[in-house]
Amino acid sequence: MNPQPAQSEALRGGEQPVSAGQVLRIHGLSVSYPVYGQEPVKAIRDLDLGVRPGEILGLVGESGSGKTTLARAIMGLLARPGRIDGGAVNFDGRDMRALSEEALRAIRGRDIAMIIPNPRGELDPLLTVGRQIAAVARAHLNITRAKAEELALEMLRAVQIPDPKRRFNAYPHELSGGMAQRVVIAMSLVCSPKFIISDDATSGLDVTVQAQVLDLLRALVRDKRTAMMFITRDIGITAHFCDRVAVIYAGEIVELAPTGRFFENPMHPYSVMLLAAFAHNPKLREKWHKPLASLIRSQGKACEYATRCVHVEPQCNATHPELRELEPGHFVRCFVPVLRPA
Amino acid sequence: MRVLRYVGKRLIFIVPQLFGIILVSFFLVKLIPGDPAVLMLGPFATEEQLEKLRAGMGLQGTVLDQFWIYLTNLVQGDLGTSWQTTQPVLLDLFQRFPATLELITLALLLALVIGIPLGVAAAYFKRSIIKKFSDYYGLLAGALPDFWLGLVLIFFFYTMLDWVPAPLGRLDIALIPPPTVTNFLLIDSVIAGDWQALWSALGRLILPVVTLGVINAGPILKMTQSTMERMLESDFIRYAETCGLPRSVVIRRALRNSLPSIVTIISVLYGFLIGGAVLVEIVFSWGGAGQYAVQGVLNADINPVLGFVLFSAIFSLVIYLIVDLIYFAIDPRIRS
């Protein structure tokens, strides 16, 4: 796989949501959760997205927007009773949906790794962190225990844990949150995966620790040209951390752009809202009392965001908008995008 | 080091705990109506004879006086005599306690062998036939009385099929028991090299062990299943799945984290079965400790009852101590 064309395309700024050269390509993915006695909830609808090797794609959305569902669907780990209704997930040339459970198990942790929030809860409380990292290495790399433990120690060093030899034998409850997060990062990187999903991974950390962890993560990912999907609720982080930003709302991508362009001119009213510190504006805030999950869904007949939008026009309630490329590489799903006066 | 200090502390506390247990059970047993002196000497005994007997048995004076006498004897290792067996209670219990222990230990082992794998499988394969089976098993094991199951097993496997020996005690009457060392028949016959006795004892253990094992696998199964289900849903197991760890590793980790609950239920069952196996002991004429205590209660024979309570209490306390040590070994959070 040659990343060169994709990269130049990205430099021109015209990268499509899904294009050749991306290590992960999601096509028309739909996921729903059946609800007893009602229409199923469509958590992800007809979603297209891809990530190049070496790229960090930010995925921003509020709780319930489908971020985690997307991450789990990619890995084939959708929690019951969720199910994939359609679409394709292509990872490194393989159709993930066609793979057996055993084949997926071999990919998880080795080729696709995931970093999740609440790191102390993600670690087995009864095993030392060194052994847990080594266990992942041993499961995937066909190496001896001694070799795996050596590798684990090396990873602890790579994530800059102070006194790694001692921490190797520490139990999760003996670590601070930031330290545990580093352990989880070490665990996800131990097999040098091609793709990492970070699901709100730094949300539980202090701001300073968060910055340290993010810098470290970026350095490690850049170093190995790993692709990364960085899921977060904090749009501010993406400005410094990601190459492209995708905003997800009610299971749809509503805006996708290279980071620079996105922050120069966010076009979707929702993106503007996320950026505008809406909590301080009472006029904007009044439509936000209800959580996303409780809003009535349009079932594909209107703009999902119309119920909260301050720009609603008649067509927003009549037709479902498509994702349109309004400038090279900048995609927006809106009839009345916010355009900066030229 | 911490562990040793902990054990030492616990051992020191055993003495006051035992005192409390004896205190309560002594006065409770005293509430049971019935005068052993009258029962022993029969209706034609004179008041003088009765009085003399009571004095000999430490039954004169107030209840407090009697308690004091019991305690002073106890400290010297004298648990009194049973008027039914006319033997010292200590001797009786040394014969009967191992009989019960042998039975319930093997039964619990069987219960573990049934309950834990079934519970693990039912928790892991949530929509399988195994889950259905274990649900019904738990229900039946909880609903069926053990002595009834014992009778049914005797009917089928002794009366109809004649596959097992008669339910009449621990050893064939025609056999001479091996020399007493531990009073655990299996161990004693191995020590004596008496394979015939070993074979006979094993044969007679089958049905009561199966009876108790099958019934007591129920709670172990339920506890294993529910704890495993919780663990399999937990964040760290889901993360282990995300890391692509093999199924066997995932199950092992979940089971290890479930062990404290499973060990707890086992220890509770172990303590309970010392007395709780009594109906099965009666069905199989086992001559165990439970039977001995019940006979004591029914015949105002106080010393065996108190002796049994004391032995059971010591046994339970030791079991709980071992359980705490197992927690120590399993969970680093307790250690630090």
Image (spheres, coloured by chain):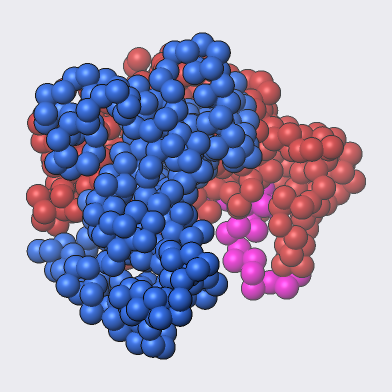
Coordinates of residue A205 in the picture (x, y in percent): 38, 61
Image x and y of residue A123, in percent: 34, 47
- Locate residue A1 relative to residue A263 in the image: left or right: left
Nearer to the camera, B226 or B57: B57
Q: Quadrant of residue B138?
A: top right
From the viewer's perspective, tell me whether residue B126 is left or right of residue B244: right
Q: Is residue A159 left or right of residue A304?
A: left
**Residue found 28% across the figure and 56% down from its top:** B87
Residue B326 point in image, percent of width and height: 26, 51
Look at the image and give the colour of chain B: blue
Label count reads 0
Q: Nearer the viewer, residue B83 or B171?
A: B83
The answer to whether A314 is drawn above or below residue B8 in the figure is above
The color chain A is rendered in: red
Asked if residue A258 lies in the magenta stretch, the reply is: yes
Measured as percent of width and height from the top left, residue A10 is found at 44, 31
Q: Quadrant of the C terminus of chain B?
A: bottom left
SS assignment for the magenta stretch, majority: helix
Q: Which residue is located at x 35 percent, y 22 percent? A: B203
Residue B127 visible? The answer is: yes
Which residue is nearer to you in this view: A194 or A315?
A194
Q: Start and end of the magenta stretch? A: A257-284
Q: Is residue B255 visible?
A: no
Query: Which residue is painted at 16% across and 62% down in the image?
Result: B3
Q: Looking at the image, is A141 positioned above or below residue A66?
A: above
Where does the N terminus of chain B fall, quadrant-wise?
Answer: bottom left
Q: Does the magenta-highlighted stretch encompass residue A103?
A: no
